[in-house]
Image: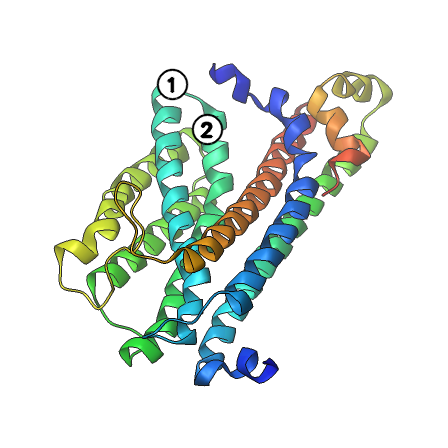
Amino acid sequence: MMKEIIFMNGYGLYVWSSFLFTFLSFLSLYVVIKIQYVKEKNKFITKFGNLNSERAASARLQNINKEILSNSSNI
Amino acid sequence: MFKLFEPNKIFSITSKAPKYVLFLFVIVLSVGLLEALILSPEDYKQSHSVRIMYVHVPAAWITLGIFSTITLLSIFGYIFKLKNFFLISKSLAPSGFVFNIIALVTGSIWGKPTWGTWWAWDARITSMLILALFYGMYLLAWRIYENKEHVFKITSIITILGIINVPIIKYSVDWWNTLHQPASINVFAESSIHTSMLFPLLIMTAAFALFSLLIFLMKYNTELIKIKNKGLDRL
């Protein structure tokens, strides 16, 4: 049973390499997009921290800014 | 109606949704892999190599679906001046491009045991390669052009030209003699695929669709934060 799943009548190399390529592509894409997301979010938090109290209060009024600053926006 | 798509309204949803989509994706993918690699039967002609279909076909379907969606959104966005539609299109493109590459590479791997060659310049494969080039041009346009009006126009032109290729991909196996087999699944007529293979194929398609949704949401949120970063600069 195990041998059949691995070797698949001699087609194992083709089948497993197709699935492996697919999931490596998924993982690479996920990691790249995640890095971009974290980078932009950290940039936003740093910029927000540098605002003076008046500007920070004005920026905080916007819903999106509140969402970005809240923990719930973590993926 | 278009106001429903405004970033202010949907960000509270798009920012929370990825973790639920990721959870659902892992569950659906686990079931799909079990079905595709173990439970589904081997083909009487192609033996176990038919299992490549469970990643190749969903990837091809989704890349075509995403390109068609991008084109529609770009056209509507350009006509009705809806910038958010361009943002949605831009966020869909990376996963569409990756699915296109997956379809080409897994198709090539499947070709070796089935046709005895890794690559053939037949109509279906060549038209899929052309689609990958259109995706590449679309993504490059967003990187190259700084001016928003310019990039909206250029990307709309790329998608309109690229969409001509989509029906060619679909009907290439009927219009020309190709190595590629004709479609086994038909929405309007009886499909020639057995349910024991159709079921895992549909589950894997659902898993891939969830993955593209996940990537779209993450990319869309990133783009919105980028805009907000520019907004903070202006304060």
| Residue of label 1 | B80
Q: Nearer the viewer, residue B212 or B98?
A: B212
**Which chain's residue wears label 1?**
B
Q: CA distance from mark 1 to mark 2?
A: 10 Å
Q: How is the image coloured?
A: rainbow
Q: Are marks 1 and 2 in contact (CB under 8 Å)?
A: yes
Say which element carries label 1: helix
**Viewer-proximal residue, B177 or A9?**
A9
Residue B129 vs B145, above or below: the answer is: below
Please state which amino acid type lies under the numbered disc 2: Phe
Identified at 16% across, 55% down, the residue is: B174
Tell me which corner region of the image, top left, top right, bottom left or bottom right, holds residue B197.
Answer: bottom left
Whichever of callouts 1 and 2 sits on the residue coming sooner in the sequence is: 1
Q: Which residue is mark 2?
A: B85
Q: Residues within 10 Å of mark 1 (few under 14, many from 20)?
A: few
Residue in view at x 33 percent, y 50 percent: B134
Residue nearest the observer in this picture, B129 or B112: B112
Residue B28 x, y percent position in the rendering: 60, 51
